[in-house]
Image (cartoon, rainbow, N blue to C red):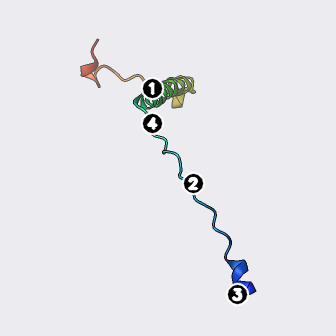
Amino acid sequence: MNKMNSKSNPIAVPVTPLADPWRPSWMWHLKVLAGIYIFLVVFYFVVDHVLARLPQPYRLRDVPMEMTPWLKK
């Protein structure tokens, strides 16, 4: 046998079967979805608070009732 050929072919390592892939449960999905919704709600109120404190030309405006008659209270 050629020395060059024997060095280039390493000994094969036996392949062990892998464990079952991780599959998320319904409870995991609910927790992640709840976390996303909580983050979005907190983010909305933080952005609303920051925008309300801007100086006058950039402040959120109050929409007049004449512009939105469907919002009558």
* C-alpha distance separating marks 3 and 2: 30 Å
Please report contact status of discs 4 and 1: CB closer than 8 Å, yes or no: no
| Dot 2 amino acid type | Thr
Question: Residue beneath label 2, please?
Answer: 16
Question: Which residue is more in the foreground, 42 or 1?
Answer: 1
Specify which label sits upstream in the sequence, 3 or 2.
3
Q: Secondary structure at mark 1?
A: helix
On residue 8, which mark appears?
none
Question: Residue beneath label 1, please?
Answer: 34
Q: Position of residue 35 (x, y in %)?
A: 49, 27
User: Which of the two marks, 3 or 4, is nearer to us in this view?
Assistant: 3
Count residues near mark 3 (Cα–Cα under 10 Å), then give few for <14, some for 14-19, many for 20+.
few
On residue 24, which mark appears?
4
Considering only vertical position in the picture, is 68 above or below 13?
above
User: Which of the two marks, 3 or 2, is nearer to us in this view?
Assistant: 3
User: Which of the two marks, 4 or 1, is nearer to us in this view?
Assistant: 4
| Dot 3 amino acid type | Met
Q: Position of residue 37 (x, y in %)?
A: 45, 27
* C-alpha distance separating marks 1 and 2: 38 Å
User: Which of the two marks, 3 or 1, is nearer to us in this view?
Assistant: 3
Which quadrant: the C terminus? Answer: top left
* C-alpha distance separating marks 4 and 2: 24 Å
* C-alpha distance separating marks 4 and 1: 15 Å
Question: Which residue is more in the foreground, 14 or 47?
Answer: 14
Q: Is residue 59 left or right of residue 62?
A: right
Count residues near mark 4 (Cα–Cα under 10 Å), then give few for <14, some for 14-19, many for 20+.
few
- Residue 23 sits in quarter: top left
On residue 1, which mark appears?
3
Q: Secondary structure at mark 3?
A: loop
Please report contact status of discs 3 and 4: CB closer than 8 Å, yes or no: no
